Image (spheres, rainbow, N blue to C red):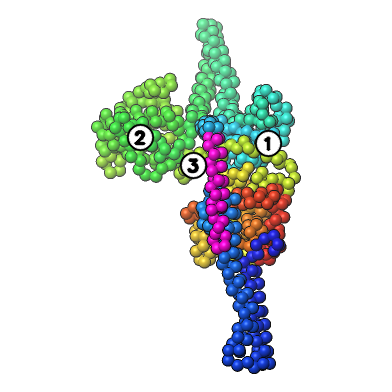
Amino acid sequence: MLGRKLPKRQRLIGLWLLLSGVSLLGGAIFAAWLDSLFQPQGLARLVLWLGCFSGGGTIFLVGLLLERMLFTPLRHLQVQLARLVANPDARDDYPPEGWLRGLGPDLMRVREAWRSDRTRLATAHAEGARSAARIRQELETLLQVLDTPLLLCDHHRRMLLFNQAAESLFDNHPGLGLGKRLDALLPVSSLQDSLGQLPEDGSPRELLMPCDERWLHVVMRRVPQSNGETLLTLADATTTWNSEMGVRASMAERIAPLRQHGANLASAAEALSSVRHARHIDDTLRQRLEAVIEEESHALGNEIEGLGSLIEDMQQQGERLAPLWSNDLWRSLNERLADSHIEVLPIGMPAWFKGDAPALLVMLEALLVRLGEETGTTQFEGEILLGNRRVYLDLIWPGEPLPQRKLAVWAEQRLETLPLSPRIGDLLRQHASDAWSVADADDRHARLRLPLPAMDRVGAPPDQLPPRPEFHDFGIADLPPPDAELARCPLRALEVVAFDTETTGLELRRGDTVISLGACRIVNSRLLASDVFDVRVDPGKPIPPASTAIHGLTDDDVAGAPPLPVVLPRFRDYIGDAVLLAHNAAFDLLALQAPGTGTTLDMPVLDTLLISRALDESLDGHDLDTLAERYDLSFPPGTRHTALGDARVTAELWLALLPRLEARGIETLEQALALQATALDREDACT
């Protein structure tokens, strides 16, 4: 080991001090023996003692000179070379010094030539990259606006592409992600035969398949002139199924009674007409026929009334009546009213309700224009009030309430901008609603009130996230097949999940446990920005203030969070077939494998701490902060000592270590595990 690597600084200093001490001690003993033997006096005695100490002093001074002029510059040069291998554009913090100072111009020339070659290579590919970027931008734009969920898979059924519609369809499903197998997302047993029999010309094949509690309509096409890639478009058929088996089925059931009552009524009316012209028929038969007509008319009226109720239900339950957040409605309404100088100020608490948003906006705009003309004001207030089973949308203005006859006239106004030009009253009936005006409680304001269907949902809708750039990665198709031996898989082809935990303390064997678990995914040597796992965990015990001072989490932050036995199966689903990665993985694995969790993490684990120690045995400092500084990595503000923040930097550290591993011929998972095992054997503290 000493013949191949620069010795560790602690060992070198220890050896130097040991030799110096032994030499000085031996010199002192030898000087004392000679002094007692010859008993020199004056200058001779001084020369005797100095000569005996000269060996130890020389060793001490030579070691000090070598440490300052050679070994320290060599370590700095090792750090700089490691940084340049990981990132050619890294800053130069350690110029050659000491006896290596003469290498400075040569090292600068090598670095500049390296960067110059990279610049020329980038310039040579600029035109192709510009064209590829334009195509990629057009593809991402198309994926973002396309309402049809779609998935693109390679011949190993790994996902190469998906769009936002697919992400919405499989909301929070752990099986959706680049590089993940289709098996984890859909019951592939239903697709197996169809996928194997798809024609190569791209002709579609359709399939209706169950997925969780839904039925999905799947259209599959083989991508022509590709390496067995398949495009799947999906649609949720459950809504259509429920519609056909619900209100529409009830309508079909009412058709037969309507026809029967109509036929009976027609027969009775015809018979009664014949009886009236027959003089020899008594009144008893006539009364019986009249009773039949009355009975059938009443039954027919009931059936027609029921049919009308079903039609109203269809209008209210149709796909056009969608969940709406009131603040979104007010914002859109004010945008429409900008040219008319009318403004609505939302007040009160926002709420969910159900409505036809385009029609409601046109109707409210027409009503506000009418109100502005009637009241002479352009400033209105809008409020949503929760009723028993309805939501009341109120438009408020200073003044008197409107008479109902005026509202009846307004209800006849046709809205020409909508298809078929419906009247305001038609839209109110579509929402099972009406309009009336009431005085406010302060007797200074009035309201126009519209009841609308309520929703069970509570809370504001989540913020719209920016479009993710990782919806596609066609390089996944070039990776080894998933059934290849994992140990021989190239490091750059590995699917890696970097994770980290925050705990109540460091004494895991004495009751400390996990309070936060964060992870991110590396696919095809790319760190996916938004494919993350970030969950708070209820530790079932108070968090000590000393731990809160480090990670910032308090008891209130984890109140109501799921316990570790609930979180761990979800994390196992998130990992899938990936390899785990952590910094000082032994600690985090011990935290996750606490008794009672019931879930085992039995996949291979890479440890950046051990790998760094194995690569740079002679360097001090392999903690995450030191390595981040060494490889020019940074923690975004507020992310240090957070589970997800530390996991992201660990993932970036792994990508920085990859070139150094490859430079040493370590290119497979098996070789990387063997390398880190050597560091584990040498460092008992890591066990």
Earlier in the chain: of badge 1 and badge 3, it is 1
Where residue 391 sits, quadrant-wise, is top left
- In the rendered picture of this protein, how many numbered marks are placed on residues? 3
Where residue 683 sits, quadrant-wise, is bottom right
What type of secondary structure mainly makes up the magenta span? helix
Label 1 and label 2: CA atoms lie apart by 48 Å
Is 66 on the left or on the right of 668, as rendered?
Answer: left
| Segment colored magenta | 97-126
Quadrant containing the N terminus is bottom right
**For the point 45% across and 28% down, which residue is it?**
430
Tag 3 secondary structure: loop
- Residue 465: assigned label: 3
Earlier in the chain: of badge 2 and badge 3, it is 2
Q: Which residue is mark 2?
A: 334
Relative to 95, does residue 363 appear above or below in the rendering? Answer: above
Earlier in the chain: of badge 1 and badge 2, it is 1
Tag 2 secondary structure: helix
Q: Amino acid at mark 1?
A: Arg
Where residue 30 sits, quadrant-wise, is bottom right
Relative to 419, does residue 594 appear above or below in the rendering? Answer: below
Check contact, mark 2 vs mark 3: CB within 8 A: no
Q: Which residue is mark 1?
A: 157
The one of 260 and 505 positioned closer to us in this rendering: 505
